[in-house]
Image (cartoon, helix red, strand yellow):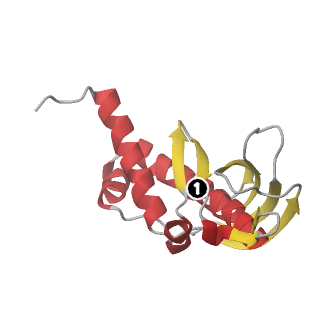
Amino acid sequence: MTELPSQARAEAERDAALVRLAETVAYVRLLGVRFDRMGDELTARLPFAPHLVGNPFLPAIHGGVTGSFLELTGMMQLAWSVVLADIERGGAAAEAVARGAFAPMPKTIDITIDYLRSGRPRESFARARIQKAGRRVAHVHVEAWQDERARPIAMMRGNFLLPKG
């Protein structure tokens, strides 16, 4: 078996950590959300499934699914920033991540969702941007889109309680 170069091995370990982190959230598993990583930025992918439709006459993805997708994306971006810092720190923190021992997920304080257009029966994407993260509270902005990122289907602004640590 050939050994991966150290950079490729580090990237593979980060990808594996992200998958393990996402699997800790039951609703991520239920919706089938997947996350693609580019450095410290995540892109969430919500594959279309018929049970996600709220209005079969349009058809359109249920607003609750869209809202949950946005909230999950924001929470995962915050959690990933903590995991990435632990990996970079090395030592016991990195070993804990390798074992799948993660800090608790951020808790939602409040969110505001703007529904901009109907989510059609196709794959949706979302990306979160951490606007400000303090010691206990973080403010996050998330956008979801389908075919064109410049035409979002929904946006979320949210405040999250960060785990103590």
Q: Which residue is mark 1?
A: 47
**98 to the left or right of 109:** left
Query: Which is more toward the observer, 114 or 139?
Result: 114
* Picture quadrant where residue 47 is located: bottom right
Residue at 67% from the left image edge and 62% from the top image edge: 69
Q: Give the number of callouts.
A: 1
Residue density around tag 1, few if under 14, some if 14–19, many if 20 or more, within 10 Å: some
Q: Amino acid at mark 1?
A: Pro
Residue 132 location in percent, x, y?
Answer: 75, 51
**95 to the left or right of 70:** left
Residue 133 location in percent, x, y?
Answer: 70, 54
Residue 98 location in percent, x, y?
Answer: 31, 54
* Picture quadrant where residue 163 is located: bottom right
User: Is 5 situated above or below 31?
Assistant: above
Residue at 64% from the left image edge and 51% from the top image edge: 123
Residue 48 location in percent, x, y?
Answer: 61, 58
Residue at 52% from the left image edge and 41% from the top image edge: 37
Residue at 48% from the left image edge and 66% from the top image edge: 103
Q: Residue furthest left?
A: 1
Tell me the element at label 1: loop
